[in-house]
Image (cartoon, rainbow, N blue to C red):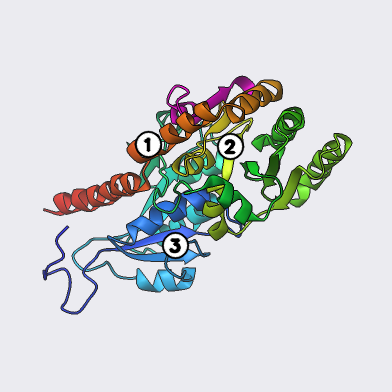
Amino acid sequence: MSTGPDARHPAGADRRDPLFVLNMHRNFTGVSATAAAVTSKQQEQYALKLVGGPLPGCPEPIGFREAVRLTRTPPPGRPFHIWHVRRNPEMRAGIFARDVLRLPVKLVFTSSAQRRHSLLPRWLIARMDAIVATTPAAADFVPNVHAVVPHGVDIERFHPAEDRAKAWAASGYPGTAGIATIGRIRPEKGTDRFVETMIRALPHLPRHTALVIGKATKEHAGFLERLKQNVTEAGLDDRILFPGELPAETMPGLIRGLGLLVALPRYEGYGVTPLEAMASGVPFVASDEGWFETFSGEGACGDIITDGNPEAAARATVAILSDARRHADLAAAARLRAIEHFSVSAEAEAINRIYETLWSEAAQARA
């Protein structure tokens, strides 16, 4: 895109096209992480406005009313603004702005679910102007897919440690090495599978400490308490820890200090934590959900466990962490695969092309 003077941009104005990214969720979730990664790259090309809550590495957010005010008229040289949405509340806000307030807005939605959506999301999704599916499987469950664009990882923010042992020591957690699962604490995410896996594996890994990183909502408080009770009964209170939800800005440093990332969900639309581990030079053990098998490169970066079976996951965990040569090979392959196949810069560029296509199609229709 040209950045020189043209008819679309008056002198002294920001010559980049505007882009509005909505983030209307109180908690930092996997969706938040993927949105933050790509949005932080998109701000290099667009005059980007983040609407709702903050995201690390992104501009200070504005409120919905301010977004409405800024989109009352089309941007210079463009027939409409683009609002990128990723959740139900954001789709509702976008539809209200476009169809009720009659603002010059087009809505782009990212879909990663690999299952049929319920009634309300289907209604909302059917009203999007363009859809980005993260996988071919996700594309099968939504209409009007403009492109399949896998989520990427920021390979500059997530990078290997110069000394993994020192990075782990800097985390402040006990032991000389770490294993973690990261995500909401609930059955769907397989948190219980991770705990069972660690109860089986840690007796064979005396230097390792396991972390359950994430938040349990009120409805899953009982589930969390049962997990902690299981840990106590196994005599591993000092080796399986529940630090809760950690600040997003601390996660890259913590992940690069890990020896292994474990993700054993019962359902996952995509799943970004193994990618963050891969970019950090950390192998993973994962269930056969999400896009984990593709991440693994046929086992080059980690092991895929059928149905997330804890016994098999424990065997894989012990095998990887007990073989320094294999661990080093997996770690190197993981970093390389993240760079070559799952860079967030490539994701941002592919999504940006969708915006440009929407604007181009509108210009051609008016010609």
Q: Dot 1 lies on which element?
A: helix
Q: Which residue is mark 3?
A: 57
**Label 2, residues with CA under 10 Å away: few <14, some 14-19, many ≥20:** many
Tell me where residue 274 appears, x and y as whole percent.
52, 38
**Residue 145 visible somewhere in the drawing:** no
Q: Is residue 301 magenta?
A: yes
Camera-side mark, 2 or 3: 2
In depth, the one of 233 and 89 nearer the eye is 233
Q: Earlier in the sequence, mark 2 or mark 3?
A: 3
Tell me where residue 307 appears, x and y as whole percent.
63, 22
Residue type highlighted by circle 3: Gly
**Label 3, residues with CA under 10 Å away: few <14, some 14-19, many ≥20:** some
Tell me where residue 184 appears, x and y as whole percent.
66, 45
Q: Which residue is mark 1?
A: 336
**Residue drawn at point x = 14 percent, y = 50 percent:** 364
**Residue 238 visible somewhere in the drawing:** yes
Q: Dot 2 lies on which element?
A: strand
Residue type highlighted by circle 2: Leu
Q: Earlier in the sequence, mark 2 or mark 1?
A: 2
**Residue drawn at point x = 53 percent, y = 64 percent:** 53
Tell me where residue 289 appears, x and y as whole percent.
55, 28
Left or right: 220 with respect to 288?
A: right
In depth, the one of 102 and 183 nearer the eye is 183
Residue type highlighted by circle 1: Leu
Q: Earlier in the sequence, mark 1 or mark 3?
A: 3
Camera-side mark, 1 or 3: 1
Task: Give the spatial CA distance, label 1 vs label 3.
Answer: 24 Å
**Label 1, residues with CA under 10 Å away: few <14, some 14-19, many ≥20:** some
Residue interval drawn in magenta: 291-307
Tell me whether the residue at label 2 lies in contact with that at label 1, contact meaning CB atoms closer than 8 angstroms.
Answer: no
Q: Which residue is mark 2?
A: 260
